[in-house]
Image (tube, grey):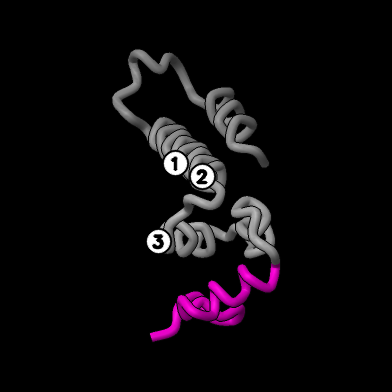
Amino acid sequence: MTPIKKINQLIDSHPGSFEECAGCRICEQIQSISQQWSDDIESKNSIRTILAKGKEMTKSEIIHLIESGVTRREIQKASKMEAGMFAELMRSWGLNRNKRREA
């Protein structure tokens, strides 16, 4: 269920007025879902911003993208690097395909 649908469902199940509510379980759930949704939007915007940097992405930004679930293919395309060159860069940084980071 999408966050907005879940929030709407909780609002519909809320007894009485929100203005008179002292912070019931339903209000807490709505707040929690809203915060998670906001955090997800901020994270997605951050990812788009980093990818838009293209060739100017830093190592730490690329690590952040990988840890955020962005595929290496997406990063490689955004950086406009040839696949072999990108793979070599990842190896030189210790970011092998099956490992996020080598010690």
**Image-based side of 69 in relation to 33, left or right:** right
Q: Earlier in the sequence, mark 3 or mark 2?
A: 2
Q: Residue at x 51, y 38 (%)?
A: 45
Q: Amino acid at mark 2?
A: Lys
Residue tagged 3: 60
Q: Earlier in the sequence, mark 1 or mark 2?
A: 1
Q: Residue at x 65, y 54 (%)?
A: 80
Q: Amino acid at mark 3?
A: Ser
SS assignment at label 2 = loop
Disc 1 versus disc 2: distance between alpha carbons?
22 Å
Q: Earlier in the sequence, mark 1 or mark 3?
A: 1
Few, some or many C-alpha atoms within 10 Å of disc 3 (few <14, some 14-19, many ≥20)?
A: few
SS assignment at label 1 = helix
Q: Single out the mark in the foreground, 1 or 3.
A: 3
Instruction: Give percent across and percent down for residue 85.
Output: 63, 70
Disc 1 versus disc 3: distance between alpha carbons?
20 Å
Q: Quadrant of the N terminus?
A: top right
